[in-house]
Amino acid sequence: MARTFSGIQPSGGMHLGNYLGAVRNWVALQDKHQCIYCVVDLHALTTAPNPADLRANTLTTAGLLMSAGIRPNDSTLFAQSTVGEHAELAWMMECTVGFGELRRMTQFKDKSDRTEFISAGLFTYPALQASDILLYDTELVPVGEDQRQHIELCRDIAERFNNRYGETLAVPSHMIPKAGARIMDLQNPQDKMSKSLDSPGTIGLTEDNTSIARKFKRAVTDSDGEVRYDPAAKPGVSNLLGILAAATNRTPEAVGEDYSQYGALKTDTADAVIDLLAPIRQSYAEFMSDPTEITHLLAIGADKARVVASATLQRAKDNAGLILHNNSYNNSNG
Ligand code: ATP
Ligand code: LTN
């Protein structure tokens, strides 16, 4: 069966953009593929979070994924740091990617502009991401638009590795949804909705209905009064159309034709989002009533992931000329 892999950072509460851009597709793919989903806590270390926050956010992110419909019995759900192969293959990926390639990554440029201490890990972040993906012979990587460049770089890394050392790593493709791939902040519609910005224009996945309705009511639009999908000229209105389209499985252009007033568009978008998120909020409350169960499920997931990851890592090390201690010991002992 084809394999799907994707990851999410435990950098705080998940938001509507994570759900519409990525997680909703993760859930749907479970019926077609063998799916592996990872809470990428090592990636979160790039910005030195408080340890207690990181630990708590890893559990709540896993809880949110299950509340959104990830089934740990069918899929493999685990925390990145518990499968050591990720960090080990990442070094080999760092030696396969070019400094110039990493320097062109727009996520690095954006994030380094916003931080005082720019860690080397923030710069080499896509090499660890390539390791995540390539360890599982992944065919498909469902992500939002902001990750397109990283997945393309991952393909280049895999191809370069294979050219150097012979066929070793499967070359993956990205899956980016037509609607919902880039949800913008409701207060600053020129910026993408983000966990780490902590903006009043972010809609959390477990936010209550009143708060969701209020945030949509206050969403920034413009003063020309025309409902039209035009992200460059009308970012606020286009974002509302994009959200409503993604939530109702239509195109933003088609949704735009149904409205002539901003007020009705805001109300209907809020209602559609409330319908989408209310069941997630309910099941999240149930999941979080027993966090030890989440820890237990993540441990089972890690055991499943390690079986695949260790085989790929051994193959990559062997092909690159690294000595496989276990094998040579076994061989010399018959
Ligand atoms: P951070 O702000 O901490 O960088 P984030 O909100 O960008 O976090 P990630 O953990 O980096 O979230 O991303 C998880 C998944 O959600 C990725 O596939 C990413 O492309 C997708 N995603 C993130 N933000 C959005 C958004 N605003 N619209 C659509 N998809 C998004
Ligand atoms: N870089 C991604 C998170 C991420 C990821 C991955 C996504 C880490 N490893 C592997 C897809 C596949 C982000 O910042 N959203």
Image (cartoon, grey):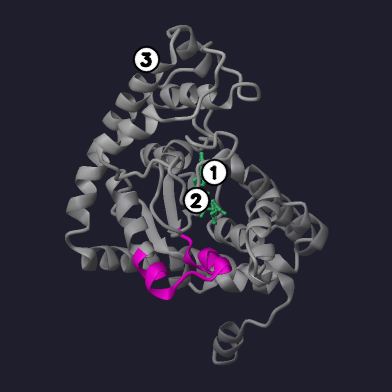
- Would you call the spot at circle 1 few (<14 residues within 10 Å), some (14-19), or many (20 or more)? many
Q: Which residue is mark 2?
A: 5
Across and down, in percent, residue 77 comes to 37, 57
| Residue 41 among those drawn in magenta | yes
Residue 290 lies, in percent from the top left, at 18, 63
- Residue drawn 54% across and 87% down? 330
Which kind of residue does numbered mark 2 sit on? Phe
Classify 10 Å Cα crowding around label 3: few (below 14), some (14-19), many (20 and above). Answer: few
Secondary structure of residue under mark 1: strand
Q: Nearer the viewer, residue 225 or 75?
A: 225
Q: Nearer the viewer, mark 3 or mark 1?
A: 3
Residue 314, can we see it?
no
Residue 83 x/y as whole percent: 46, 71
Image height of 178 relative to 250, above or below: below
| Residue 53: mark in rendering | none
The majority secondary structure of the magenta stretch comes to helix
- Quickly name the residue at label 1: 140
